[in-house]
Amino acid sequence: MRKFVIAAAAFAVALAGGTALAQQRTLAIGTGGTGGVYYPLGGGLANLISKSFPNMQATAQVTGGSVDNLKLIGSGQSELAFVMADAALDAQKGQDKFKGNQVELRTLMVLYPNLMQIVTIEGTGIEKLSDLKGKRVSTGSGGSATEVMAFRVIEAAGLDKDKDMKRERLGASESANALKDRKIDAFFFVAGAPTSAITDLGATPGVKMKMIDHTDVLAKMNAKYNNLYSASMIKAGTYPGQDKDNKVTAVWNLLVTNDKMPDKEAYDLVKLIIDHKADLVAVHKEASNFSIENQVKANSPLPWHPAAVKYFNEKGAKM
């Protein structure tokens, strides 16, 4: 009888262990390239989730950026993603790069403004947007929202992205290296500032980096694209050798999921981010923008996850 009790107890423990194992949740987070801001922040978030929730293991995925991330959400290969609001709206509507492949999205959190950075170096003859005509220009990797927004900036400047320039499709690090090696004349990259790849370029001996102002095209962009964009500034000294303020266009970054994330999970995730914001600021200073004040429905063109709205209202966001 005693042997039976011991065996039964052992079976119960094994069964409980199997149940716990079965309940382990894997969470994939779509980020971006290693030279941008999404990737380090996504890695920091993955570590925070894995450390804080015993039943959850999160991983940060290196991707081409927002467009790739949104497609991964749509296919069920990612549960969370860092994305730009303009690309996310295209995915939600099933248009442009998502034509025929609508993605049901929910905003969990407004993160920080993404700044369109147009970078060149002395000797290229580029001082303003119109000078890009006839030049070799990288407009971002093919799976990125950099490409989406770059095309809109170029269009608003009255240029043809295919006829007026020789266009490359490179990520941040690849673009910076190509510019350093004089294989391209300029590149677009939309991200928080500072972006490591641009910092590295500015710190390169013998290279004088220049940032191109372009807020003059903002009105035309907003007239066509639902007022998604705003004016911002990269202050002098943000990058090595940057001796004047850079007037740029901006769009909000969002943390999104699909329409199937359970309420408790969504609530716990946004609470974790706010409660441990300092941990993420230590990874990248753009996390300082992860504020209750920025959680305004108008900052995201997507439907919000109801559990996120519940949490932020409890914190006084008045959504």
Image (tube, rainbow, N blue to C red):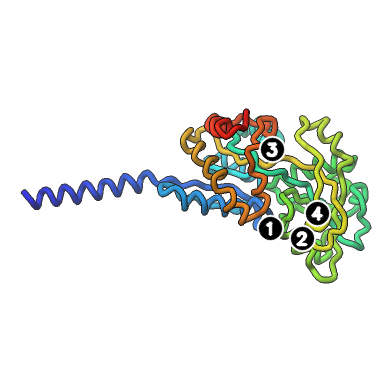
- Nearer the N terminus, badge 1 or badge 2? 1
Element type at mark 1? loop
Whether label 1 touches label 2, CB < 8 Å: yes
Whether label 4 touches label 1, CB < 8 Å: no
For residue 195, side relative to residue 259 (left or right): right
Kind of residue sitting beneath label 3:
Ala
Marks 4 and 2, Cα distance to the nearest angstrom?
A: 8 Å
Task: Identify the residue position indicated by label 2 in the image.
Answer: 176
- Nearer the N terminus, badge 2 or badge 3? 3
Whether label 3 touches label 4, CB < 8 Å: no
Marks 3 and 1, Cα distance to the nearest angstrom?
A: 21 Å
Q: Position of residue 161 (x, y in %)?
A: 84, 45
Marks 2 and 3, Cα distance to the nearest angstrom?
A: 25 Å
Kind of residue sitting beneath label 4:
Phe
- Nearer the N terminus, badge 3 or badge 1? 1
Task: Identify the residue position indicated by label 1 in the image.
Answer: 35
Kind of residue sitting beneath label 2:
Ala
Kind of residue sitting beneath label 1:
Gly
Q: Is residue 46 visible?
A: yes
Task: Identify the residue position indicated by label 3 in the image.
Answer: 85
**Discs 4/1, front:** 1
Q: Position of residue 315 (x, y in %)?
A: 57, 34
